[in-house]
Structure formats: structure tokens, C-alpha cells
Image (spheres, grey):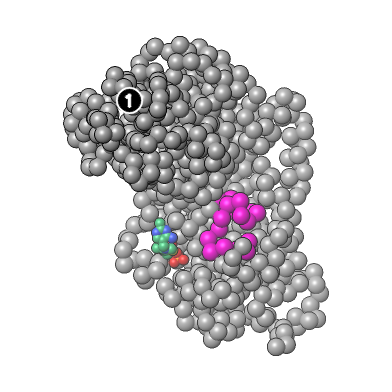
């Protein structure tokens, strides 16, 4: 089919400035054509939000195509990730290397740069993986916080905005409230949310299920909030300029029409998440006065977009010059922090502390052990942020080297997240994505469920975040089954790329913290006890024994070795107790500590075989469900743990009542050995 140009297009000078409408229509056309070609996707949001995005990317945003990792770029988060074609169109139009028209034509196809929802690391220019609604907003709060924290530390070398595009769905999600309320409380004035206020979701009008006044809601959370016509570029620009000057975070509610330009579907949920169809697209082309073939952007318009993509080049060069003027040690420290390399001092500090720990004769809860470790590590690792979701005295995450931050005062390293576990987890992801920090948060292990969607995204994105989950089993005692995790270890271990550490004493806690800090592309969670545990490691080893995920902590005394007992955390001491009882009956048993079940399968087969050993009886002990343990103990292995929820009682009574005791383990072993 021959290309059709509008009257006069051929004779237009190539440099004639395209109108705003033409620039925005380029996004609309690419979005509807890509979705049509893929036979799936979401054309409505990109078509509706094209005006706001065009103003942002051509007039306001500080960025440069091809410099997607320039540390001081403004961040843009498409929180409504289903509108991915908005972002891909922008990346193509502004000239991000690799984002070609062919990639747009391969929207949603295997190994394209244009997956269904934007994926961090996969596509240059994508700041975070979005799709699960509300997460992007939570990430953006973390990015804006990271920006302020780095600014407080390094000065104006870090001075940028964080912009978000939110949808009705984003703002209906509960996490949005935690995120908004945090940002308002902290006074994150460089956070600006463009809300695609199209009043349509999947089921129909948003009013089917929601009657919030979002502007009032944000204002109540200490935001600056305004309404604009989302198809009026001047009004959007004015609102953005005002927002930049606000001392509070800003919401700009852009009243838009979903699927803008589609003749019959615009303004309806039929524009949301399916191809428009040939007839509707032809009608949209007429309505938008966009007579070009699919995927064709006239040179004049493309050139203007490409110029927009280079608008930030001068700022970037000025920034590089300013970086060069920093004192050498400050510049090198800044660069190290952004590369994510650990400081050289860490290893030495950790080893010195480890030496001090042995011989260890003190019984201590691993949550306390973690605090002692943090006292040492936080001094050596200035990028380590700690905090808690209102459980500071229980999580033991506050240490001397991490002073608290306060609203609009960002000289500090400890964050009181409030009772906002989900918001905390999403913001921590955003801090890690921003760069410059290793962020950690904390709550009870039971409430890891409240963090789970963000933890999953951290694992999917391969970012280094650390969550300190304490009160990790029935061992927390009297608070009872509402607070006693049973299935949580298994559920977290089931997540690909997630490292679940459950150390057994002070030495293991130190080793696990080292491993978590070193895991540059994996999130880590700690499961730590409330109750005191006896030390289980007596000899000093410079080697990090926990690095294999599992290791023989107590060899069998005698042969043949009949029993291997595997345990984690608080149950390592139970296993050691069982080993002694068995020895008295002449049964040689060995004990293997399993501080990180996720690292164990990464060992080569010979090492795994050596760790598992060849004793005929294998027993797993953990105050949690069996799920996942069969990989080590085998289907015919014995498991001593939980098969139900817990109960409210002093913890020793609970261990006795649920039969997770040295005697119960030894009895099971004897039965299997035929004694
Ligand atoms: C947590 C979560 N729940 C559900 C969905 C499925 N989903 C995708 S978009 C959407 C709502 C669409 O409404 P809106 O956010 O206003 O987007 P628009 O219709 O304007 O494109 C839903 C429920 C999701 N992506 N994430």
C-alpha cells in the first residue's frame, strides 16, 4: 500500500516545527499499531496520557537518550505498567539506542525489548519493573527519598526530580496510600505524580467501585495537588512548573480520555486492554489527522522527538564537569556507591568481629546478634540504610551508625517507615533502583506477607535489598498463632532469586549478613529469632561456612554414620541435642546447619553430595512446614516441624507441645534405625 501523506506533507520543510498534537499523536499511533500487531496489549492509556507524556518528555524531564544510567537524570516511573507502549513509544521517539521500530513491531514477543509490561534491566530506559498496580508509585517514593539522602550526603551533584505516571487502578490499590502518606510525611518535594485521571478501569467507569476525591485525598496527606485538563499542553506545563517549586510532593490530576482519538471506544473500558481493530484504528487516524502508515513517523516529527531526546545533553555535560570538580576522595566514594561495590573495609571489619565472637558462650537471640553485627557493618558500609515498620525495639535494626532521618531532614540512615510494610518494601526497592544505597527494612516474619508483592519484584528485578524479619517461628511464644509464621519460610524460599537466611547463632548471623551485602543481584531476607539461642559454632574459621547454604556443623562421633540431621536457625541447637542423645544410645549422627536453603542448590554436585552425606536416615528439623525440605532429606526423610498453626504460650511449652525437641528428633531417628 502506498504511503498517504496529508495535504502539503511532502512539500513541508523538514525542519518545520511539528505541533504538540502531532508529537503526541506519534505516541498514539505507535501504541495502537503495536497493540494491533501483537494482537494484545493496552492502547487506551498511552493514547489518553500522550499529551501529558509529550509535555513531560519534550519540555520538562532532565534526561538524555543514550545516557540511561546518568546518575542525576530525572526518574520517570510508569506505575501503570500495562500502558507499556507509552514508555516504549517514548524511548523509540526520543532515540534510546536499541529501541527501534522493529522492537515496537515485536511488542510482547519472545526476547524483544518490548515485553508486555516494562522490565527493569531488560530494556534500557526502564527505571523499574511495573505492572502490579501501585508498586511503581511505591518505588518512586523510594527513588525520591534516595535522591534527598544522597543530596544531603554529596551535595548538589545529586539534584533531580522523580516523576510518576499513575492510573485510577494504581490509586485504588492499598499500597498507594502507604506510599502517598510516607511521601507527604517526609516532605519529598521533588516527587511529582501525573495522574491519568481518565475515570475508567477494566470493569467500566471507575465510579463502579470508587468515589474518592483524589485531589482532596492527596492534600490530606500533605501533598500539593491540582487538577488540569490532561489534553491541554499549556495547562500541564504550568502545573508541572508549579509542582517543581512546591515544598511538598505534588499530584497533578490530568483529566484525560482513555483511548483519545478512537472514534467509538475512547472514554470507555473497551479502549483499555485489547487491540482496537482495523476499523477503529482507521477511524482514529482520521480523527487525529494522522494519515501515515502503521509505524511510520514522518521525518519532521521524528526529528523533533529526537531533538527532545538530546535536550538534556548540556545538563549532563555540566553535571560531569561538576563531578570532576569534587574532591578526589569524595568523587571516588560517590562513584563507588553508584557502582554498588562494597567498601574495602568491610571484609576486615567482619573478620575482626568474627574473631572476637569465638569462643562464643553467650546465648543470644539472632535478632540481637543481627543488631551487634549491624553495629560493626554499618560503620564499615556507609551505604547501608536500616529501618523498621514501627518495630524498632523488636527488630533491633537501629544502631549507632544509622542516625534517624526526619521530615525534610535527610542527614541520616535510619528510616521509621511507620506501620506500612508494603509501602516500606516498595520504597526500599526504589532506593535500590535509584542507586547509591543498600537499603534494608524490617518487620515480623509473619508480616512478610504484607511485603510480598514488592519482594517478588525485587527478586524479579535482581536488586540488592535486605529485609530483616524477626520473630520467625512459634519461638516468639505468647503472641500466638496470628504472629507465628509457619509457611513463610517455604513461601519465601519458593521465590526464584530470593535468598532466605536463617542463621543459628551470632557467627552465622555475621556470615549471612556478609552474604546478603555481597549479593549484588539478589534480594535477601533474614528470619531471626525473638528467643535466645545457645551458640553452635565454637571454632573460628576465616572461611564463610554459610556461603554453601548448608555445611556440616557437627560431625558424627563414631561410625558407621547412621543419621544425618539437617536444621536451620533455632532448630540447629535442637539437632545438636538429638545428636548427643543418639550418641548415648550408640547411634552415630552428624548435624548439618542449613542457614540458606537457596544457596545450597548452587553448589556443584560433589559438594552437595558431601554435605548431604550418605547416612541411611535423614531428618530435617525446622519449626515450620516441611514444604521444600524434601530436596535435602528426600521423600522418605523424616521431618520434625509444624503441620498446623501455632498457639499462644511460652515458647518452651510450644516446642514441647509441638514435639520439636531433641528427644522427639532422637526418638524418630531411633525408630527409623530400628532401635
Ligand atoms: C495489583 C494488580 N491488580 C490487578 C491488575 C490487573 N489490571 C491491570 S490494569 C487494571 C485497571 C485498569 O484501570 P486503570 O488503572 O485506570 O488503567 P486504564 O484503564 O486507565 O488503562 C487492572 C485491574 C494489575 N495489573 N495489578
Residue under the image location 48 percent in, 48 percent down: 496
Q: Can residue 573 be seen by looking at this rendering?
A: no
In the picture, measured across the screen, residue 492 lies left or right of residue 120, that is left
Res. 367 image quadrant: top left
Please say whether residue 121 is one of the residues in the magenta stretch.
yes
Report the magenta residues as a range.
112-128
Q: Mark 1 = which residue?
A: 587
Judging depth in this view, the residue of 431 and 530 nearest the camera is 530
Rendered location of residue 178, percent (x, y)? 39, 44
Rendered location of residue 350, percent (x, y)? 55, 20
Residue under the image location 64 percent in, 33 percent down: 341
Rendered location of residue 378, percent (x, y)? 53, 23
Please say whether residue 453 is one of the residues in the magenta stretch.
no
Rendered location of residue 399, percent (x, y)? 46, 21
In the picture, measured across the screen, residue 639 lies left or right of residue 85, that is left
Judging depth in this view, the residue of 308 and 76 nearest the camera is 76
Residue under the image location 65 percent in, 78 percent down: 294
The answer to whether residue 524 is above or below residue 104 is: above
The answer to whether residue 219 is above or below residue 538 is: below
Q: Residues within 10 Å of mark 1 (few under 14, many from 20)?
A: many
Amino acid at each position: 500500500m502506498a504511503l498517504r501523506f496529508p495535504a502539503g506533507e511532502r512539500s513541508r520543510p523538514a525542519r518545520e516545527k511539528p505541533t504538540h498534537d502531532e508529537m503526541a499523536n506519534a505516541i498514539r499511533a505507535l501504541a495502537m499499531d503495536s497493540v494491533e500487531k501483537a494482537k494484545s496489549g493496552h492502547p487506551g492509556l498511552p493514547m489518553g496520557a500522550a499529551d501529558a507524556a509529550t509535555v513531560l518528555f519534550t519540555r520538562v524531564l532532565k534526561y538524555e537518550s543514550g545516557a540511561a544510567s546518568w546518575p542525576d537524570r530525572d526518574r520517570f516511573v510508569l506505575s501503570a505498567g500495562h500502558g507499556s507502549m507509552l514508555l516504549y513509544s517514548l524511548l523509540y521517539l526520543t532515540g534510546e539506542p536499541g529501541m527501534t521500530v522493529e522492537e515496537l513491531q515485536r511488542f510482547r514477543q519472545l526476547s524483544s525489548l518490548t515485553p508486555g509490561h516494562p522490565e527493569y534491566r531488560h530494556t534500557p530506559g526502564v527505571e523499574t519493573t511495573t505492572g502490579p498496580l501501585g508498586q511503581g508509585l511505591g518505588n518512586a517514593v523510594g527513588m525520591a527519598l534516595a535522591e534527598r539522602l544522597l543530596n544531603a550526603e554529596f551535595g548538589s551533584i545529586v539534584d533531580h526530580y522523580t516523576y510518576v505516571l499513575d492510573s485510577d487502578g494504581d490509586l485504588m490499590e492499598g499500597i498507594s496510600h502507604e506510599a502517598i502518606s510516607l511521601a507527604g510525611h517526609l516532605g519529598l518535594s521533588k516527587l511529582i505524580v501525573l495522574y491519568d485521571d481518565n475515570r475508567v478501569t477494566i470493569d467500566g467507569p471507575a465510579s463502579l467501585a470508587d468515589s474518592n476525591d483524589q485531589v482532596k485525598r492527596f492534600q490530606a496527606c500533605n501533598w500539593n495537588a491540582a487538577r488540569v485538563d490532561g489534553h491541554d499542553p499549556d495547562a500541564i506545563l504550568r502545573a508541572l512548573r508549579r509542582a517543581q517549586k512546591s515544598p511538598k510532593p505534588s499530584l497533578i490530576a490530568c483529566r484525560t480520555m482513555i483511548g483519545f482519538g478512537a472514534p467509538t471506544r475512547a472514554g470507555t473500558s473497551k479502549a483499555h486492554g485489547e487491540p482496537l481493530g482495523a476499523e477503529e484504528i482507521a477511524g482514529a487516524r482520521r480523527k487525529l489527522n494522522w494519515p501515515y502508515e502503521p509505524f511510520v513517523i514522518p521525518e519532521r516529527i521524528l526529528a523533533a522527538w529526537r531533538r527532545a531526546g538530546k535536550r538534556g545533553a548540556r545538563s549532563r555535560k555540566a553535571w560531569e564537569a561538576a563531578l570532576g570538580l569534587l574532591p578526589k576522595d569524595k568523587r571516588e566514594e560517590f562513584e563507588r556507591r553508584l557502582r554498588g561495590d562494597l567498601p574495602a573495609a568491610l571484609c576486615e571489619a567482619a573478620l575482626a568481629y568474627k574473631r572476637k565472637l569465638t569462643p562464643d558462650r553467650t546465648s543470644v537471640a539472632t535478632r540481637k546478634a543481627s543488631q551487634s553485627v549491624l553495629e560493626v557493618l554499618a560503620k564499615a558500609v556507609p551505604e547501608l540504610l536500616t529501618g523498621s515498620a514501627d518495630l524498632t525495639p523488636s527488630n533491633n535494626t537501629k544502631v549507632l551508625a544509622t542516625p534517624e532521618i526526619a521530615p525534610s531532614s535527610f542527614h541520616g540512615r535510619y528510616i521509621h517507615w511507620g506501620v506500612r510494610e508494603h509501602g516500606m518494601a516498595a520504597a526500599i526497592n526504589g532506593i535500590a533502583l535509584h542507586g547509591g544505597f543498600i537499603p534494608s527494612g524490617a518487620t515480623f516474619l509473619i508480616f512478610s506477607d504484607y511485603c510480598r508483592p514488592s519482594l517478588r519484584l525485587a527478586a524479579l528485578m535482581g536488586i540488592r535489598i535486605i529485609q530483616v524479619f524477626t520473630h520467625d517461628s512459634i519461638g516468639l511464644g505468647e503472641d500466638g498463632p496470628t504472629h507465628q509464621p509457619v509457611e513463610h519460610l517455604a513461601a519465601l524460599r519458593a521465590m526464584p532469586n530470593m535468598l532466605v537466611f536463617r542463621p543459628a547463632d551470632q557467627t552465622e548471623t555475621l556470615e549471612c549478613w556478609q552474604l546478603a551485602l555481597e549479593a549484588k543481584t539478589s534480594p535477601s531476607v533474614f528470619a531471626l529469632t525473638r528467643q535466645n539461642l545457645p551458640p553452635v559454632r565454637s571454632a573460628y574459621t576465616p572461611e564463610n561456612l554459610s556461603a554453601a547454604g548448608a555445611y556440616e556443623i557437627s560431625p558424627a562421633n563414631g561410625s558407621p554414620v547412621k543419621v544425618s540431621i539437617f536444621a536451620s536457625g533455632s532448630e540447629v541447637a535442637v539437632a545438636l541435642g538429638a545428636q548427643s542423645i543418639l550418641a548415648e544410645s550408640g547411634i552415630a549422627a552428624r548435624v548439618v546447619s542449613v542457614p540458606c536453603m537457596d544457596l545450597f542448590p548452587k553448589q556443584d554436585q560433589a559438594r552437595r553430595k558431601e554435605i548431604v552425606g550418605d547416612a541411611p536416615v535423614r531428618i530435617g528439623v525446622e519449626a515450620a512446614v516441611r514444604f521444600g525440605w524434601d530436596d535435602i532429606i528426600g521423600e522418605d526423610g523424616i521431618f520434625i516441624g509444624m503441620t498446623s498453626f501455632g498457639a499462644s504460650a511460652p515458647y518452651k511449652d510450644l516446642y514441647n507441645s509441638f514435639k520439636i525437641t531433641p528427644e522427639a528428633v532422637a526418638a524418630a531417628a531411633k525408630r527409623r534405625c530400628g532401635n
